[in-house]
Image: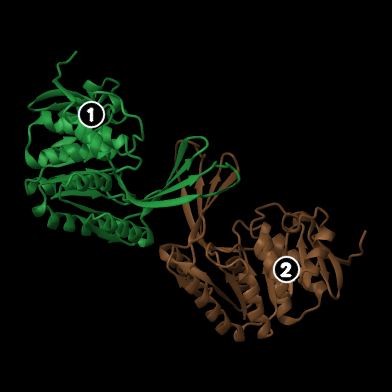
Chain colours: A brown, B green
Amino acid sequence: MILTVTLNAALDVTYRVERLHAGGSTRVRSVAERAGGKGVNVSRVLHGLGVDTLVTGLAGGTTGRAVRQELALAGLPDALVTIGRETRRTVAVVDEQAGETSVLLEPGPTVTAGEWHSFTTRFTELLPGAKAVVLSGSLPPGVPVDAYATLLRLARAQRVPAVLDTEGEPLLAALPARPALIKPNADELTATTGLADPLAAIAALRTAGARTVVASLGPEGLLAVTPEGSWRARPPHPVAGNPTGAGDAAVAALAAGLATGAPWQPVLARAVALSAAAVAAPLAGSFDEALYRRLRDQVAVGPFTKP
Amino acid sequence: MILTVTLNAALDVTYRVERLHAGGSTRVRSVAERAGGKGVNVSRVLHGLGVDTLVTGLAGGTTGRAVRQELALAGLPDALVTIGRETRRTVAVVDEQAGETSVLLEPGPTVTAGEWHSFTTRFTELLPGAKAVVLSGSLPPGVPVDAYATLLRLARAQRVPAVLDTEGEPLLAALPARPALIKPNADELTATTGLADPLAAIAALRTAGARTVVASLGPEGLLAVTPEGSWRARPPHPVAGNPTGAGDAAVAALAAGLATGAPWQPVLARAVALSAAAVAAPLAGSFDEALYRRLRDQVAVGPFTKP
């Protein structure tokens, strides 16, 4: 089982509208709700691949209950820890005429010290069943900035490899606890390290404690720097669609690779194919299965040598 | 007790944002949630006046539970009938830089024939305790277009006077059941009757069955055409603020007048003062109490003779 952690889970609400009237009233044509948050998206992709997965993290209030209900409907088992405050919502307004989407992001619920302690206890209990853990996304208010360092040390103590997908302070504070793999995108590399050159940024993150860095470069694929070597993996052609969730799909493939101990080249090929297949699907956490099967044998993975 | 009916209740969500980025991501600074819908606003105003009131209507799902929780917190008793589908939300995005508010209105939940039947039964049971009923707002999908006619006949059978505040088809279909009072605004008068002249529109609505028509004319106050005479009631000065809920405040005063059988002139004065005091308060259903007390003796109510 691959355990995913979403400390700042969300109820993702999607409104389709004919035209968004700023400063006026807009009738919503259709409403869709899904459990969201990066770890939840990873579990959804793993479930779609037929890989056993369990969702944990924090959820509270009526929105938290809605998150759990939707996970159950999607066939995703959850071990979310209940908190007192309301799980945040995100509201995506899809403007059909303008062909653009506006997203409103609620702040996360404030988590108490006792709730955070309960979560670490629950996480420790879940680790013996996990072949890999995925720690994804931002931290809600109240959770200590070194939360991921704490979870990485708990996982390491039980020899469970961990993928960490976050940015900024929570990423920097986690690196001393030596994650097996981190997956920043190009913007996150620069924002976190202050270095404009991706290779310099990757080197800095590895020096700070990350064993492997897999940088996602959007339509250009992935760049992996590992103790076993460096690779560049590119999709055979660009794919049009919704890039939200593409990084989470890559993380799902990377975590599945860590869990089985597969060699890097096929794992990176699957990560690129899954990421492209996620772009082709309308919702984060979904992917185009036929496209994934077609692409995974076409991804070019070659050794990468510093230019 | 004054019974208010909100068939299309809502969970009103307010997001404050620094600047709404159309087509991008916007972080929400603060989130507030209130039970909403026009009848709920009327009950809130009545409660603020110290008048005994009970909220009924339809509510379902997690949003319906949130509506009930908030009503309980506000001290408003409810006799809402539970439905299977989710109560709608409205999302108001207050853009602090632009100084404007964008409102997203979800469609209402589809109501089954069985749920509508359960509601009419519950409504009939509640009528003996009511001195007046208020029927407010739009109808959710599935509720018959003559729903308000049905409720008006049930109220009439128990001699409970009714205020109806709706527009378009649901208003036209209700008039044959002879509501004691309807409260269209200027736009609704025209939209419902197709007549540009407010007086002609009022006459048409009375011919069709409304005993009294009190037209709200925004900052110009009210125009009342009743079997006992016609009056024009004007506030002493304009009040700046949020006009949402001003009509509901007027309805609260009118319903309280019907319930006690008070003469029209003081009732209309209170309706205008309460409406202006609601404009001065930030949220629908709230009013500025000091302003209300000051204004109610200053409203000019004079007989109205056709120009």
Q: Quadrant of the N terminus of chain A?
A: bottom right
Taking A36 as reference, is A246 left or right?
Answer: right
Q: Mark 1 points at which residue?
A: B215
Corner quadrant of residue B259: top left
The residue pinned by badge 2 equals A182
Q: Position of residue B289 (x, y in %)?
A: 24, 39
Chain under callout 2: A
Which x, y percent locates residue A124?
58, 82
Disc 1: CA contacts within 10 A as few (<14), some (14-19) or many (>=20): many
Give SS at disc 2. Answer: strand
Q: Tell me the amino acid under the disc marked 2.
A: Ile
Look at 12% across and 31% down and name the residue there: B266
Tell me residue B246's x, y (percent): 29, 36
Question: Is residue B74 at all visible to an observer of this figure?
Answer: yes
* Residue type, numbered disc 1: Ala
Picture residue at 58% right of the left edge, 46% below the top: A101
Residue for point 80% across, 73% down: A266
Contact (Cβ within 8 Å) of mark 1 with mark 2:
no
Crowd tier of the residue under label 2, counting other residues whose Cα lies within 10 Å: few below 14, some 14–19, many 20 or above: many
Looking at the picture, tell me which residue is in the foreground, A256 or A211: A211
Q: For the point 64% across and 60% down, which residue is it?
A: A245
Specify whether residue B208 is in view: no
Whole-angstrom CA distance, mark 1 to mark 2, is 65 Å
